[in-house]
Image (tube, helix red, strand yellow):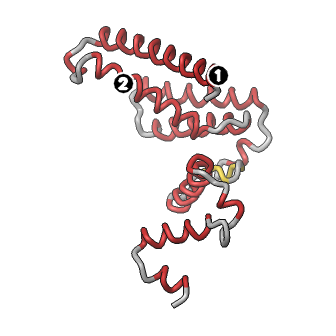
């Protein structure tokens, strides 16, 4: 029985582990695979997930290798930076108008237009929107955890004013802690 036959005969997780081991092997492996880490693979994993979602959703838009593809491509091909911000304002005005009128039939589409335009601006500026959103989510979770711990779990019994003040305190403390961490990294070359 050769290696490929033995890999097919085991369960899917074991096959995956075996395949990754082979790809990262110093003897048989690929140089690119060997130097990858969990962190370096995240953009590729996200790109593949976006491509799968794009294939599943009709008329969707997605980014592939930094290039916009989909049915809205022509809207942004030759835009200037200022025109992109005009587009954000236009889409935001549309969303606000629908919300004010309680016209929810197109609101989801208007929200998607704003998000899409902001992602386009991020790419224009060579920023990674997924990373930005992931960092924001982590900050939100850190602050929310702080609020929950200070208010001993059940936040529903507190006033909005108390929640806001505790949120502001969380923000200050977490920013301070992050600054201390950065100083220590620099000071101790961590």
Q: Quadrant of residue 88?
A: top right
Instruction: Label 1: state its secondary structure.
Output: helix
Sooner in the amino-acid sequence: mark 2 or mark 1? 2
Instruction: Label 2: state its secondary structure.
Output: helix
* Residue 3 position (above or below residue 120): below
Residue at 65 percent across and 60 percent down: it is: 34
Q: Are marks 2 and 1 in contact (CB under 8 Å)?
A: no
* Residue 80 position (above or below residue 143): below
Position of residue 152 in the picture relative to residue 187 (left or right):
left
- How packed mark 2 is, by other alpha carbons closer than 10 Å (few <14, some 14-19, many 20 or more), is some
Tell which of 47 and 93 is nearer to you.
47
Image coordinates of residue 125 in percent, x first then y, are 73, 33
Q: Which mark is residue 186?
A: 1
Q: Quadrant of residue 14?
A: bottom left
Tell which of 5 and 91 is nearer to you.
5
Which residue is labeled 2 in the image?
Answer: 144
Q: Quadrant of residue 151?
A: top left
């Amino acid at each position: 029985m050769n290696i490929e036959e033995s890999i097919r005969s085991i369960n899917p997780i074991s096959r995956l582990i075996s395949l990754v081991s082979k790809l990262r092997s110093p003897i048989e492996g690929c140089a690119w695979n060997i130097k990858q880490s969990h962190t370096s693979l995240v953009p590729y994993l996200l790109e593949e997930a976006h491509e799968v979602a794009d294939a599943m959703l009709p008329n969707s838009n997605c980014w592939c290798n930094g290039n916009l593809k989909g049915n809205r491509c022509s809207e942004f091909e030759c835009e200037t930076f200022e025109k992109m911000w005009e587009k954000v304002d236009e889409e935001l005005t549309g969303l606000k108008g629908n919300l004010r009128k309680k016209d929810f039939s197109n609101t989801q589409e208007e929200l998607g237009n704003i998000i899409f335009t902001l992602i386009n601006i991020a790419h224009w500026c060579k920023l990674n929107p997924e990373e930005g959103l992931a960092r924001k989510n982590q900050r939100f979770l850190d602050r929310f955890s702080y609020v929950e711990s200070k208010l001993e779990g059940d936040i529903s019994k507190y006033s909005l004013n108390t929640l806001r003040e505790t949120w502001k305190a969380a923000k200050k403390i977490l920013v301070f802690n992050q600054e201390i961490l950065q100083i220590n990294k620099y000071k101790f070359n961590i």
